[in-house]
Image (cartoon, rainbow, N blue to C red):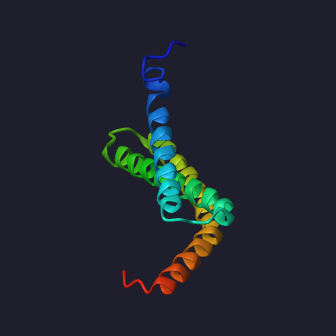
Amino acid sequence: MSSNPEGNNGNVLGPQLNRARQTANVAHGVVIRFKEMGLPDSLDAELASLCTDLGDLWSASEALSETLQTMVEARAGWDAVGDSLVDIRSGIDHMAWHVKSVKRPLTKITHYAYRRASARGEDE
């Protein structure tokens, strides 16, 4: 299978590759934001988990939205609706895993943020 200049293989891998790039950009944006704000290295493990989970949640929500839109607009029969529902269930299960995973790092970094804000007397 040959790749085009953008690194995707026609319609087979194109959307997934683009979504993967966008997910990585979202996750990277989270890392950059917190590191620019001075998040200490001692919270790097939490930051790694946080950025991965948030990026994947963002991506999964985009995919869920697209699947719902396709299902509602399609003129296909029950088999196509069933396939869509399986995809929706799979996406929701994936999101549920990340929702559970993100809670601990999110809480730790949130506590750090409020401690820093209190120490500086920020009103934001």
- Residue 7 location, x and y as percent? 48, 23
Toward the viewer: 98 or 39? 39
Residue at image position (49%, 33%) is 17
Toward the viewer: 36 or 96? 36
Q: Quadrant of the N terminus?
A: top right
- Residue 36 location, x and y as percent? 48, 59
Q: Quadrant of the C terminus?
A: bottom left
Q: Is residue 92 visible?
A: yes
Question: In the rendered view, would you say 102 is above or below 16?
Answer: below
Q: Quadrant of residue 121?
A: bottom left
Residue at image position (63%, 58%) is 49
Question: In the rendered view, would you say 24 is above or below 89?
Answer: above
Q: Locate residue 46 relative to residue 34 in the image: left or right.
A: right
- Residue 102 location, x and y as percent? 60, 65
Please identify the residue farthest to the front as the structure is shown.
120
- Residue 123 location, x and y as percent? 37, 85
